Amino acid sequence: MRIEILTHAKEDLFDGYLFYERQQAGIGDYFLDSLSADIESLLLHHGYHRQFFGFHRMIARVFPFFIYYRVSGETIYVDAVVDQRRNPASIKRLLLRLKQGG
């Protein structure tokens, strides 16, 4: 089993890094380390999370983020890393857009 972090999720992680780094130097690195550990844990716990709009949703342990992913064959695809404080309607629109390939 392997994990592939897709472009949108990489952008989400970078945006989160920038946000937290602006709050205080070093917090951005902690954010990336924490979310990376959560994503790596999918190697053991993939597929157990509830599905929303065709994606499994894992709740990050330290930061208020959702990790949306899919499992296909031997690959876990991380599609999005979304701040939980976002408007639920905008999260739904994002997931539907990602599901359609865009």
Image: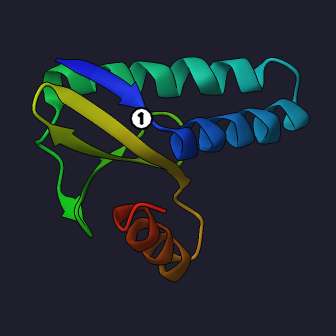
Which residue is depicted at the point 41% across and 61% down? 101
Q: Of 6 and 41, which appears nearest the observer?
A: 6
Which residue is depicted at the point 46% across and 37% down? 6
Which residue is depicted at the point 50% across and 28% down? 35
Could you say where residue 40 lies in the image, as x and y percent from the top left?
Answer: 34, 19
Amino acid type at mark 1: Arg
Q: Of 85 and 90, which appears nearest the observer?
A: 90
The reply, left or right, for residue 69 in relation to residue 65 is: left
Residue marked by disc 1: 61
Q: Quadrant of residue 12?
A: top right
- In which quadrant of the rendered image does the N terminus lie? top left
Q: Residues within 10 Å of mark 1 (few under 14, many from 20)?
A: few
Coloring scheme used: rainbow
Could you say where residue 90 lies in the image, as x and y percent from the top left?
Answer: 55, 76
Could you say where residue 100 lies in the image, as x and y percent from the top left?
Answer: 37, 68
Q: Secondary structure at mark 1?
A: loop
Of all residues, the one furthest to the bottom in this rendering is 89
Residue 75 vertical placement versus 97 (above, below) = above
Q: Quadrant of residue 37?
A: top left
